[in-house]
Image (cartoon, rainbow, N blue to C red):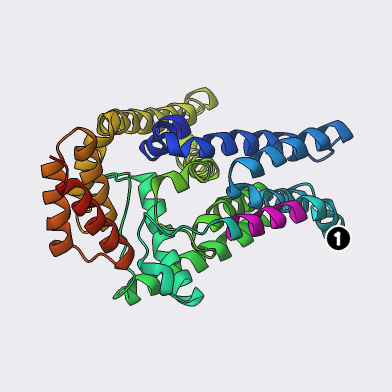
Amino acid sequence: AVFAIHPVQVETVVWISSRKGLLSGAFILASLWYWLRKDRTLEQNTCGFLCFIGALLSKALAVVVPAIVFCYDYWVAKVPFREAVRKQVFPGCCALLLLVITMLAQTSELGGVRDHFGMSKLELISVDTVIMSKYVQMLLWPGTRSVLYDPPTSGIAWNVVISATCWLLTALLFVRMGKRQPLILFAGATFILLLIPVLNLFPITTLMNDRYLYLPSIPFFALIFAGAMQLLERLRDRILVHVLPGKSRSGYFLPAVFGVLVLALLTRFSWQTERYLTVWRDGLTLWQYTSTQVPEIPVVQIQLANSYHSQGDSERAVNILRHALQQTKPDELDRERMQQKIREWSSVK
């Protein structure tokens, strides 16, 4: 339920250009439903592979599915390492082939925020540690949403150090817990693996988007609720059993508190999602709202101008672009787009 109504899911569900994410997500979940079993039959392997191919043909995000299945086989199902690798050789080759084709096909650099294109891999990884921390914050306590973000890529040394340290400690904690509870380690690894394709290790035009959290939110909240259940169980066993003697009385504590926690989250997320849906009523409302959140991004001003032009207000669209040329810092591609649109729309009587 939290996955379905979380406000970060609005972009993926409402925006028609994100339909590939929904399609790929459905195929990925179907393939994992068939493959995440300790003893898979030939029929289950075949159905899982067909769903995996469907996911690959929908969106390149599916390239991480073989890695997810390997983690399950090795950590949870206790399949020997070599056998677990062998099972994923063919799906992995299919994923690699699709990844190469996708990278060769992505020739357009229009749209998005491209300040990171000249960064080294080490710089990108450093920025990614901060972005991943922001993703955790967005999932736990979503604030103001936007269709585009412009995360800082310079002057964030301390943020990188703190984020990298937190992620390292978290990884060590998960590895330690994974020895006793392999599902915890598997869920944590799945969360990271589902984010890897959108961390710009392979260049894409945006550093950060809500839609990148569509599938990662599933293992994330599985971990959150599993952790909450464990904390409540410890609280019940160590404190309430002594304060409230009687198994019947202390036994109601865990489901009651957990239910209140889930209800509170559902209420908050539902309210935020309902409010954010009004932003997506049409293109004009979307880009009007986005221009108030990240006015410094040139492509936002271009899209806002396009929206006004499509409604017949070419004069206002031209004024927006002229103002954007002065107030934002467009690169050569965006500057050329703006100037071309100004010339075209100014000639329209």
Magenta residues, as a range? 92-103
Residue 60 in view, yes or no: yes
Q: In the rendered image of this protein, does residue 259 appear above or below residue 221?
A: above
Q: In the rendered image of this protein, does residue 327 appear above or below residue 142?
A: below
Secondary structure predominantly adopted by residues drawn in magenta: helix
- Point 43% across, 32% down: residue: 13
Task: Determine the image quadrant of residue 298.
Answer: bottom left
In reply to whether residue 94 is colored magenta, the answer given is yes
Instruction: Choose between 176 and 232: the one closer to the eye.
Output: 176
Kindly identify which residue carries mark 1: 82
Q: Position of residue 206 (x, y in %)?
A: 40, 57
Mark 1: secondary structure: helix
- Point 48% across, 27% down: residue: 255
- Point 59% across, 38% down: residue: 24
In reply to whether residue 345 is colored magenta, the answer given is no
Instruction: Choose between 26 and 334: the one closer to the eye.
Output: 334
Q: Identify which amino acid the numbered label 1 is placed on.
A: Arg
Residue 297 in view, yes or no: no
Q: Position of residue 203 (x, y in %)?
A: 50, 63
Instruction: Choose between 288 and 256: the one closer to the eye.
Output: 288
Task: Determine the image quadrant of residue 49.
Answer: top right
Q: Is residue 177 left or right of residue 20?
A: right
- Point 39% across, 50% down: residue: 209
Task: Determine the image quadrant of residue 109.
Answer: bottom left
Of all residues, the one furthest to the top in this rendering is 248
